[in-house]
Image: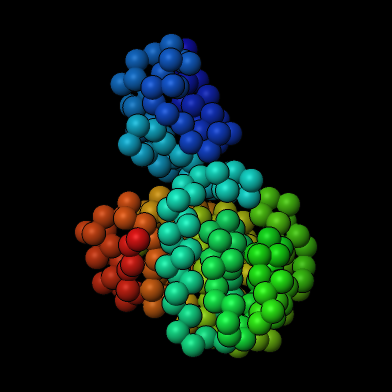
C-alpha cells in the first residue's frame, strides 16, 4: 500500500471510529507501529487529526464533523468532570445560554435545581436534560434542526437570541487556538454561537483539551471574549498559561 493511500484509509478509519489505536491499526494494515505513528504525525501536521498517547482522534473541519452519537462515546469521563466544574460557575446568573453538543448536555443536567433559572438553548437534547426541573424555564431557539447535532440553526435562532440579554453563556467549539480563536465547521452554527457571545454579559468556554490548538473552518469568537476556560488536565500548565495571558482564567479538572 502506498503512503498516500495509507494516509487516506487511515484518516477515513479515524473519522468513522472517532479514535484509533496505533497497535491495532498497524496489525490491520500489516505495517509496523512506527509506520502508523509517522502517518499520524503527518496527518496531525496537516491539521486532520490530533495525536494521543498510543493513538489519535479526528479534527473536525469544513468537510468533516462528528455527530452527537459519536461524541457521547469519546472522552466521557473528562467531559463529565468539565461539565461538573463549569456548572458550579453560575455565580448568581438567572439566565444562561447553553450551547449544542454532548458536554453542554452534561452541564445542563448538573445545573442547580433549587433556584429559578432560565435556560436558552438551540439543542433539543440539552433542552430535554432540564425541561422537567421544576425551577427551570427552557427557551428553545427556533429554526432548522441540524440532524448531525440535533440543534437549531439559521436566522430564526439568531433573531431570537438577538432579542435577549443573557447573564451567562456556556460556549463550546470544535477548535480553540491562540491564533484563530474559537472555530466550528459550519457557518450557520458559527452564526448562532457568535450571536450568543454578543448578547451575553459573561461567557465561559468549556471543552476537552483535544480542542486546543485545533482550528476548524468558521471563526466565531476570540479567546479574550471569555472570563473563564474549563478543560481537563490533558492541557499542560504551560499551554494553559498562554491562554490566561489573553484574559480568561483557565481551570483544569
Identify whether 50 is placed above or below 10. below
Residue situated in front as seen by the camera: 214 or 125? 125
| Residue appearing at x 45%, y 84% in the figure | 91
In this view, 200 is above or below 170: below
What residue is rendered at 55% in x and 73% in y?
111
Q: How is the image coloured?
A: rainbow
- Image coordinates of residue 55 in percent, x first then y, are 39, 33
* Residue 102 makes an appearance in the image: yes
Spot occupied by residue 204 in the image (x, y as percentages of width and height): 45, 73
Whether residue 155 can be seen here: no
Q: Is residue 251 left or right of residue 146?
A: left
Quadrant of the rendering where the C terminus is positioned:
bottom left
Q: Left or right: where does residue 101 sit relative to residue 153?
A: left
What residue lies at 66% left-to-right and 65% top-to-bottom? Answer: 129
Which corner quadrant of the image does residue 69 belong to? top right
Q: Residue at x 61, y 83 (%)?
A: 117
44 is higher (above) or lower (below) than 247: above
Q: Position of residue 186 (x, y in %)?
A: 62, 56
User: Disc count in the image?
Assistant: 0
Looking at the rendering, which quadrant does residue 73 occupy? Answer: top right
Q: Is residue 74 depicted above or below 222 in this figure?
A: above
Residue situated in front as seen by the camera: 15 or 103: 103
**Left of 221 or right of it: where is 128?**
right
Q: Residue 150: horizontal and vertical position, in percent?
A: 71, 56
Amino acid at each position: 500500500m502506498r503512503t498516500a493511500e495509507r494516509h487516506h484509509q487511515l484518516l477515513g478509519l479515524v473519522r468513522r471510529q472517532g479514535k484509533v489505536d496505533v497497535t491495532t491499526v498497524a496489525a490491520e494494515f500489516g505495517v509496523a507501529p512506527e509506520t502508523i505513528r509517522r502517518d499520524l504525525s503527518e496527518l496531525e501536521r496537516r491539521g486532520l487529526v490530533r495525536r494521543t498517547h498510543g493513538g489519535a482522534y479526528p479534527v473536525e473541519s469544513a468537510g468533516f464533523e462528528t455527530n452527537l452519537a459519536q461524541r457521547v462515546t469519546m472522552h466521557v469521563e473528562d467531559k463529565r468532570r468539565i461539565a461538573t466544574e463549569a456548572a458550579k460557575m453560575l455565580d448568581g446568573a438567572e439566565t444562561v445560554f447553553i450551547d449544542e453538543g454532548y458536554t453542554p448536555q452534561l452541564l445542563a443536567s448538573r445545573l442547580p435545581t433549587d433556584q429559578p433559572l432560565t435556560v436558552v438553548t438551540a439543542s433539543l437534547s440539552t433542552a430535554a436534560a432540564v425541561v422537567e426541573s421544576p425551577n427551570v424555564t427552557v427557551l428553545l431557539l427556533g429554526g432548522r434542526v441540524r440532524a448531525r447535532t440535533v440543534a437549531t440553526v439559521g436566522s430564526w435562532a439568531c433573531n431570537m437570541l438577538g432579542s435577549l440579554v443573557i447573564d451567562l453563556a456556556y460556549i463550546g467549539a470544535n477548535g480553540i487556538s491562540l491564533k484563530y480563536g474559537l472555530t466550528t465547521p459550519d457557518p450557520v452554527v458559527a452564526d448562532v454561537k457568535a450571536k450568543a457571545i454578543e448578547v451575553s454579559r459573561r461567557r465561559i468556554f468549556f471543552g476537552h483539551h483535544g480542542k486546543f490548538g485545533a482550528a476548524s473552518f468558521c471563526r466565531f469568537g476570540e479567546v479574550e471574549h471569555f472570563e473563564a476556560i474549563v478543560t481537563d488536565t490533558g492541557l499542560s500548565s504551560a499551554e494553559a498559561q498562554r491562554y490566561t495571558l489573553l484574559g480568561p482564567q483557565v481551570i483544569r479538572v
